[in-house]
Image (cartoon, helix red, strand yellow):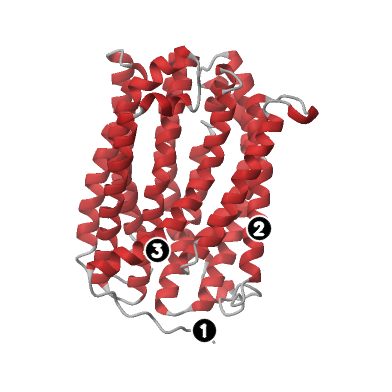
Amino acid sequence: MTATATLPPPLPVLRDHVRSTLALAWPVVLSRSGVLFLVVVDTAMTGHAGGDELAYLAIGVTPQFPLLLAGVGLLMGTMILTAQAAGAGSLRECGAVWRLGIAHALAYGLVLATLLWFAGQPFLRLVGQAPELVAGGGAVVRAFALGLPAILLFVATALFLEGIGRPRPAMLIMIGANVLNALLNWVMIYGNLGATALGAEGAMLATTIVRWLAAAALVAYALAMPDAGRYGLRGGGARALVRPARFRRLGYPLALTMSMEATCYATVAIFAGWLGAAPLAAYQINLNLMALVYMAAIGFSIAASVRVGHAVGRQDTPAAALAGWTAMGLALLLMTAFALVFLIVPAPLAELYSTTPAVLAIAVPAMLVAAANLPFDGLQAVAMGALRGAGDVWMPLVLFLAAFWGVSVPLAYALAFGTDFGVAGLLGGLLGGVMTASLLLAVRFRLVGRRPLRRV
């Protein structure tokens, strides 16, 4: 028999929607920030080992993230199906979804790790990077590949917990993971405590160790929950409750969507590599800061997905629409505040990553363009999250294609090379893409939110 739960009443006023969104969003913000902060700490600590090491790290992560984010997209069905099942009171179905997520995470992670291990360095050579960047970046790719199954295992479990409204365990685990990562970096990047100094490769190896520990801890928490049996986390029955084909029907378009965006950013990073080591390092500093702030938007995006999904499970279309718009408004306010910080103190922010004058001379002026990206990037992320919660996954893929490959990539190339704007031009191209995406996705959500919504 399927376990059921008493559903919460619909939220009647905007104030209640704001309160509920914030309660779900802030632990997700910290959790996702913790995931990215591993990369931020790697970047900052590697930058102080030398500008070349920072360039190795920057180019080494380039071929990884499109493939990694495709995996994350494939797993997003975990959250969508869990949230809608929880909203409908079908609790055992939530556990069935989680087990499917775990199986897909491990299978895709192993395939992806093998691909990157053997093809990462040849790819860097193929796209025209300098020999020293190919050698240093290739070592980073292999170190990253070892941790890919762990990343996806953590993501699948975090998405399940967020779907049932429990985002705090992932947040707490990531806080501990970041402390451990900084300590291991200190040993492995710089060669402290008698270790060999490995620079950028050491940073990635340290983070790989931490990712496996974090994944193991989060899975252990899920299995040890007092109500794990009520949610169907143990035993069989996944096929009886949630067909794998249903899971993948959501995952495939979301994987394509996320990889399309990531491939756009990776392509622009390759453009930065063509500009030279110092511009590449400066671009990486700006992108790293933008990505760290973007985690705040991801928190509201997840909150939008979960709360819209719960409303869809209750078949409450007006509540789903209001939940999505509330999350978008809150994210827009927060990202605008972060943009002001970028405008006020660009130099101190850049100096967190590097003290090399040639790098700072490029990174600091470009940060003004990075600041302009933030509000639009946040808005498009949350609009996408709201559409995911409603089960609308194919049309956003088309809109992302138009925004990121129809606008961002050609505009970035034209501004960087056709007008000699360099790194600022690359960021300007990204700005054009996120502005387009935010407008198109917001219009799409308005259309979706005006029609009856049903579970996928």
Residue 439 vertical position relative to residue 3 in the rendered view, above or below:
above
Instruction: Say which residue label 3 marks.
Output: 23
Amino acid type of the residue that numbered disc 3 sits on in the rendered structure:
Ala
Q: Position of residue 244 (x, y in %)?
A: 53, 65
Helix, strand or loop under label 1: loop
Separation of marks 3 and 2 at Cα, in angstroms: 23 Å
Residue at image coords 30%, 37%? 339
Instruction: Say which residue label 1 marks.
Output: 3
- For mark 3, does the 10 Å Cα neighbourhood hold few (<14), some (14 to 19), or many (20 or more) residues? some
Amino acid type of the residue that numbered disc 1 sits on in the rendered structure:
Ala
Residue at image coords 64%, 52%? 214
Residue 414 vertical position relative to residue 442 in the rendered view, above or below:
above
Amino acid type of the residue that numbered disc 2 sits on in the rendered structure:
Ala
Farthest-out residue, bottom: 1
Q: Quadrant of residue 236?
A: bottom right
Of callouts 1 and 2, which one flags the residue occurring earlier in the amino acid sequence? 1
Quadrant for the C terminus in the image: bottom left
On the rendered structure, is 151 left or right of 390?
right
Residue 279 vertical position relative to residue 341 in the rendered view, above or below:
above
On the rendered structure, is 249 left or right of 142?
left
Helix, strand or loop under label 2: helix
CB of mark 1 within 8 Å of CB of mark 2?
no
Instruction: Say which residue label 2 marks.
Output: 217
